[in-house]
Amino acid sequence: MNKNHLTDTLIYLLTCITIIFLFTFLVAFGFHVIPSGLLSISLGVLLLYARGKKQRPADEKKLPKLSSEKEAFYVSKGLEKEDIQYFRQTMQKAKQQIRDIERNMLATGKLKAIENRNNTVHLTKSMFREIIKEPNRLHEVDQFLYVHLPSLADLSGKYNEINNHQAKSKATYDMLDKASQTLDKMCQQIAEDYVQFKSDDIVDMEVEVELAKRSLDKDNGFQEDTINNEEV
């Protein structure tokens, strides 16, 4: 039994004990059985509701309603109902992380220079749109979605937080310098993620270019032969 499941079980057990205790207490002091039962159960429901609300992340936003067209699109890509829900939740979280990255990377001159050099904000948004187009390839971008994106959002936010300190020691400046170097590498990794995801398109283009070159060479040869055989 994992920790979360054990915690939930204990919560439900304590809630049941609370309901029974309150019911017994009310009956003992002369309250009628039915009102006492209803009041006790109502309290238990409120406790469970409060628990569930507390567990929900503060920045978690309710997913927008899924349109029939979008659902049909997901189904056409081979996604089951559970897959669709997981994909939408994952991309909703990624969208918020990209917004955080954009805000963080444009907040200071140092990070803005890194962003300009790597074109990170544009690439993260482009990557997001490409994944939306091909939800069946979610497994191919696990490092981007679950490691690189959240790490960049977290570290850039932490960098700005420390950079805004009114007083900084030499150790603080050294740490900020190392953090900026790490952020630069992370932005480069985002670019590599994009290139990797679009590698099939690049291969297709290479093939098209090669075929076009061969066709062009063939046409040139044909034209040259035609000219040579023409009577002047």
Image (cartoon, rainbow, N blue to C red):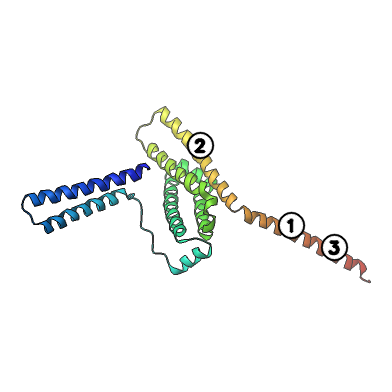
Q: Residues within 10 Å of mark 3 (few under 14, many from 20)?
A: few
| Residue 27 position in % (x across, y down) | 9, 52
Q: Residue furthest bottom?
A: 231
Identify the residue at image location x=22%, y=48%.
Answer: 15
Residue 42 lies in quadrant: bottom left
Residue 159 lies in quadrant: top left
Q: Which residue is mark 1?
A: 210
Q: Which mark is residue 221?
A: 3
Q: Looking at the image, is 164 positioned above or below residue 29?
A: above
Identify the residue at image location x=20%, y=46%.
Answer: 17
Q: Which residue is mark 2?
A: 181
Q: Residues within 10 Å of mark 1 (few under 14, many from 20)?
A: few
Q: Which type of secondary structure does the marked residue at label 1 adopt?
A: helix
Q: What separation in Å lies between label 3 and label 1 (alpha carbons)?
A: 16 Å
Q: Amino acid at mark 2?
A: Gln
Q: Are marks 1 and 2 in contact (CB under 8 Å)?
A: no
In front: label 3 or label 1: 1
Q: Amino acid at mark 1?
A: Glu
Quadrant holding the N terminus: top left
Identify the residue at image location x=17%, y=49%.
Answer: 20
Q: What separation in Å lies between label 1 and label 2 (alpha carbons)?
A: 39 Å
Sequence-first disc among 3 and 2: 2
